[in-house]
Amino acid sequence: MDRWANYVPPARSLRDTSLTCLGAGEQAGHLTATGRRTLPVHALVVVTSGRGRYRDVERDVDVVAPAWFWLFPGRWHAYGPGPDGWSEHWVLFDGVAARGYAAHTAWDPPVHAGGLPAEELAACFEGLRAATAGAGLRDQLVAASLVHRLVGATVSARAAAGEPTTSAVQAVIDAAAEPLSVAQRAARAGVSPDRLRAEVRAETGLTPHELVLRTRLATAQQLLAGSDLDVGAVAARVGYDDPAYFSRLFARRVGAPPSEFRRQQHRSVAPTRTG
């Protein structure tokens, strides 16, 4: 692995609306451990070979490749390889999107045992090396998109390594159109209401009510775009007896009334000409 490191001044327009990449690099070998330090921005460190240690105010853990860990602004940390060294890939970033990812538990757990797909990791850092070497806005846009791609890769890797969707969560999804209370949904799933809330939160980052609502609206969008059912029929199909209430809820959550969403997204299949 070539040792390289590039740093980029923040693109304020990207930072204030989405995310800006501030630097990236790769290095391997007998690296010097970081002392106790605090960064003003977010960072992701991916370890692809070797082992070492990570410490912060809440944990002191071994890091054994493949693994990755997140560094958070304003929180002290220290990390580094053991005596045999390691290979690391790192990226610095900042912006409002980072807070959005945090709200969706993208950083949990902060230290993760598991790897990213080798081809995906190589492609991201090859792109970051080129993009962070440039000075233009186009380069900064490319770098930001690659950081988003890396975050997505960690989320996908976590999901692939985790347990399949629990039966309790699936029970909520399957019965989303039915007018049930949380207690009734828990009884259907064979768990207590507290257990249901905990499983749904751990699996999706949502409450049971939010999961029901998102499932209903996603199904409604599919029906509006892919069928000729009228709005009242769509509302009834996803659990709403009052089409007017459904329309208001849909408009507020999706950003357009059902009729407008259908106009934007519905595509009919043209009849096949014969003869």
Image (tube, rainbow, N blue to C red):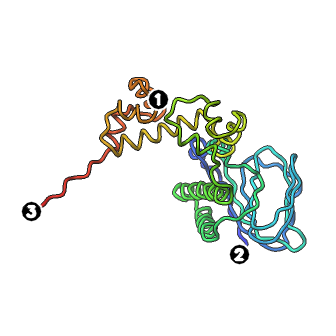
Quadrant location of residue 211? Answer: top right
- Name the residue located 30 percent from the left edge and 41 percent from the top edge: 228
Name the quadrant containing residue 237.
Answer: top left
Residue at image mark 2: 2
Whether the residues at callouts 1 and 2 have beta carbons within 8 Å, the answer is no
> How far apart, in angstroms, are the residues tagged by discs 1 and 2?
51 Å
Say which of 213 and 124 sits in front. Answer: 213
Q: Residue under circle 1?
A: 252
Distance in Å between CA atoms under marks 2 and 3: 65 Å
Q: Position of residue 150 (x, y in %)?
A: 62, 58
Specify the amino acid type for callout 1: Arg
Q: In this view, does 152 lie above or below 48?
A: above
Q: Residues within 10 Å of mark 3 (few under 14, many from 20)?
A: few
Say left or right for 123 vs 231: right
Q: What residue type is disc 2 on? A: Asp
Give the alpha-carbon distance from disc 1 to disc 3, as whole Å: 48 Å
Give the number of the mark in front: 2 or 3.
3
1 or 3: mark nearer the eye: 3
Residue at the spot of label 3: 275
**In the image, residue 167 lies at what x, y percent?**
63, 47
Between 216 and 100, which is closer to the camera in this rendering? 216
- Give neighbour class at mark 1: few <14, some 14-19, many 20+ (Cα, 10 Å): few
Q: In this view, does 70 lie to the left or right of 254?
A: right
Q: Is residue 130 above or below residue 100?
A: below
Choose between 214 and 165: the one closer to the eye. Answer: 165
Please say if the residues under marks 2 and 3 sit with CB atoms less than 8 Å apart: no
Which residue is pictured at 39% across the width and 23% down the height?
A: 244
Q: Residue at x 64, y 70 (%)?
A: 118
List x then y, in percent, for residue 194: 72, 34
Left or right: 32 in relation to 138:
right
Q: What element carries label 1?
A: helix
The residue sitting at 78% across, 55% down in the picture is 111
